[in-house]
Image (tube, rainbow, N blue to C red):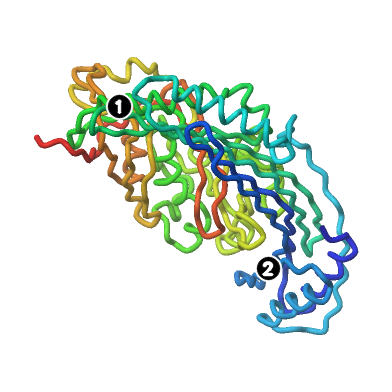
Amino acid sequence: MLKKEQLEKLLERCMASSCDFAEIFEEEGTTESLSMLNGKLEDTNVLIRAGIGIRLYKGVQSVYGYTNETSEESLNALVDDLRGGFGIESKSVSISLVEETHENLHPIKENPVEASLESKVALMVRASDAAKAYSDQIQKVSVGLASVCQNVQISNSEGRLVHDTRIRCRMSVSSFAQDGQNLQSGYEAPGASKGLEFFEERTPESIGQEASRIALVLLEAKDCPSGKMPVIIDNGFGGVIFHEACGHALEASSVSKNQSVFCNKLGQKVASDKVTAIDDGTIPNAWGSQNVDDEGNPQQKRVLIENGILKSYMIDRLNGRRMGLESTSSSRRQSYKFETTSRMTNTYIAAGNDDFDEMFEGIKRGLYAKKMGGGSVNPQTGEFNFAVLEGYLIEDGKISYPVKGASLIGNGADILFNIDRVGKNLERGQGMCGSSSGSIPTDVGQPAIRVSQITVGGTANE
């Protein structure tokens, strides 16, 4: 990392132009990924990354550049290229950086990057063995273990200087079950902003067993019928629908360009009274948490929707300028190679007051989506299509039989109004979110919710 005096000189050089703001993002990090097949380690990859990204603003315009060359000559050349975009001026600007300190909300016990390879392989073997032993029908098990340690330093022309360290680990297990020609797979992948101590609370055995349980359920599943029907979406990763279909449309990167269904709707009713939605980057040790965002602002808890009323967007500095609104500490990026923008952290629908069992009452025919998979969405229209990883048909108010090939098709803005039950069992699941500033870790979450009507795509012939 550059020293304070070096940063001050570099920022002063940036400001010797017609720009009105300059920012430097420095990063040193290590990413490690291990993969195992049927109990044998197959691959080990370690990526060491270090570099600097520099950004200049002039009004609502910005220029950005990055380099992994940290010599004074190289950095000055990069700055000269950037400020040339706005016009170099011989003005004298004095910048004095003041280092900010923030409480570390995400302490760890055992840094996963620094831990021995033997200890990490042992964890993976435990998951693999448990998944394989779950049933004689489990034919293949793959296990992945990903670890990240990222150190960042952020400084800007307003005098800010802040550091943050982000440490995360995540284990993924895929189990493959076979019955004759029928082959199905199950998947489970929890993670946290923790060290290897995470696997004391979420044991490798439980991860492997859950992946195998899903695979075996799908072996017995029948083709899913299609049509419009009530759907109960369970907790945890079920929140991926809100994340994709609504969350992206609440990011300032979409709203500021008038490319969101939620543009100009602050203070308006956009959802059922049952819906309160939150993006909270301060949850201790959560997968998507940070002490500060990637512009150096202390992370926040952001209430996006409260009892159906739109309260806030997720805003970064640049898009906040475009919208005439203050930053909500929502700026994130994958690495120094990406210009930062507004992104989600840990986004979820808050717990409600409805009992899970009562959600099934009155449903003559519907779908219980216990585990959600991936999907796609158009943030400008809110239209989405999501796969159901584990689903069950509901008949006469009761769970009937498991189904496969189900998908949920609809419009995020419409679905928010059709949520008529919100349960008490809030949980969060982990994923990676890709957008213009790269791939970042995010939590999605919700309690079980009931959507009164949604289009279910299926594979059954009726």
- The residue under the point 70% across, 45% down is 149
What x and y, as percent, mark residue 325? 60, 56
What x and y, as percent, mark residue 55? 68, 67
Residue 66 badge: 2
**Which quarter of the picture shows residue 422?**
top left
- The residue under the point 76% across, 56% down is 154
Q: Is residue 111 left or right of residue 359?
A: right
> 291 or 134: nearer the eye?
134
- The residue under the point 42% across, 22% down is 423
Mark 1, Cα crowd under 10 Å, few <14 / some 14-19 / many 20+, is many
Q: Determine whether 256 is above or below 223 in the image.
A: below
- The answer to whether one can see residue 261 in this image is yes
What x and y, as percent, mark residue 24? 74, 63
**Which quarter of the picture shows residue 14?**
bottom right
Q: Looking at the figure, which quarter contains the N terminus?
A: bottom right
Q: Amino acid at mark 2?
A: Tyr
What x and y, as percent, mark residue 37? 49, 37
